[in-house]
Image (cartoon, rainbow, N blue to C red):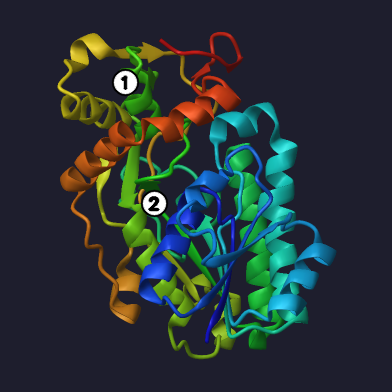
Amino acid sequence: MAVYLVTGAAGFIGANYVHFLLEREPDAHVVAVDYIGFAGNIANLDTAIGKVSFVQADIADLEAMEAIYRKHRPDFVVNFAAESHNDRAILGPSVFMRSNALGAQVMAEASRLVPVTSHVHVSTIEVYGELAAGQQWFTERSPLNAKTPYSAAKAAGDQMVRAYMATYPDLNVRMTHCANNYGRFQLPEKLIPLAVTNLLRGRKVPVYGDGLQSRDWLHVDDHCAAVHQVLHADLPPIPVAAGTDPGLLPIFDISARCEVTNLDIARRVCAELGLDPAEWIEHIPDRPNHDRRYLIDPTKLETELGWAPTREFDAGIAETVAWYVSHRDWWEKIIAEKGDLGFDWSRVGPAAVG
């Protein structure tokens, strides 16, 4: 029986991966770790409780993580745990640095001290920064050029994991960078669930600036399948040439090649709910240092591992909106506990928007 250790398991993507594992490998033992920070929500695992071993722990605490490893002896490790909201990172970057940088190092170290079959460090497209005018996309060979506190903390974690790859070649650690995810269980501070939950409460959809910031969108189910494929891939040893060519490292960028502006996302959500975008979208002050455009090329993942997305964007958006409509109790409880999750930068802080 395979033992999986999944961190960030009560978060958006981590919870979806736990459910993916339970469906894909029902006989596996899943150890779900989360410290239940701002974005953690144990309710995301409601239907999995009793099927997994849940441990509340901080991935930046080496003593705690090593103890978990020694108790459960995982075969496979997937580290989703991260603070991931650019707006909150601007107001409080220190917690992002702890989870995203130190946490990444601690997880790699735990896998070094208590060896595992393979370990995937899950990162983000945003470590590459902002695409230059005329640049088509980023690849695994692109330099890390993060420019926000959130993405810089993730890039710091990436650099440490790359150092572990090169220094401890028997560790068998892999890395992924994903496009913007959407789907069930996403905290309603992110664009799509914020838009849906605002509209369902009679509030407008807040769009930063002109709304023409362009993003690369990926359904969370496709992301989970890609991560699982990377985790189990039979990869060759890291060549010496990887020291100067990061494209030769076991790093894979995950994208469905679906580029959509924030404004168009807001319009699509309005349309799904039968509302006129002209009446239900409002433009608000942009956040500081907002990346204009980014897109990644998944060719390496497609050609070397044979992965391909299966979720069509229009259908995926419709399904996602419908999920939030039918799970009102889930998000209303979150808002009751955390308060309104929109940010109004004219007041420099989180505030009700609409």
Disc sitting over residue 46 in the figure: none
Q: Residue at x 22, y 9 (%)?
A: 279
The amino acid sitting under disc 2 is: Ala
Q: Is residue 153 above or below residue 21?
A: above
The residue carrying pointer 1 sits among few (fewer than 14), some (14 to 19) or many (20 or more) residues within 10 Å by Cα, namely some
In the image, which is nearer the foreground, mark 1 or mark 2? 1
Q: Which residue is mark 2?
A: 179
**Relative to 208, 321 lies left or right:** left
Give the vertical position of 121 relative to 277 (above or below): below
Residue at the spot 57% in from the left edge and 40% down from the top edge: 39
Which residue is drawn at the image coordinates 37% and 69% (left, top)? 23
Q: Secondary structure at mark 2?
A: loop
Report the amino acid beneath label 1: Leu
Residue 80 in view here: yes
Query: In terms of depth relative to the viewer, which is nearer, 314 or 33?
Result: 33
User: Residue visible at 70% across and 83% down?
Assistant: 168
Secondary structure under tag 1 reads: helix
Q: Nearer the viewer, residue 27 or 353?
A: 27
Q: CA distance from mark 1 to mark 2?
A: 27 Å
Residue 195: percent from the left, percent from the top? Answer: 34, 25
- Asked if labels 2 and 1 touch by Cβ distance under 8 angstroms, the answer is no
In the rendered image, residue 36, in percent from the top left (x then y), is placed at 65, 45
Identify the disc placed on residue 200. 1
Whether residue 298 is situated above or below residue 317 in the rendered picture: below
First in sequence: mark 1 or mark 2? 2
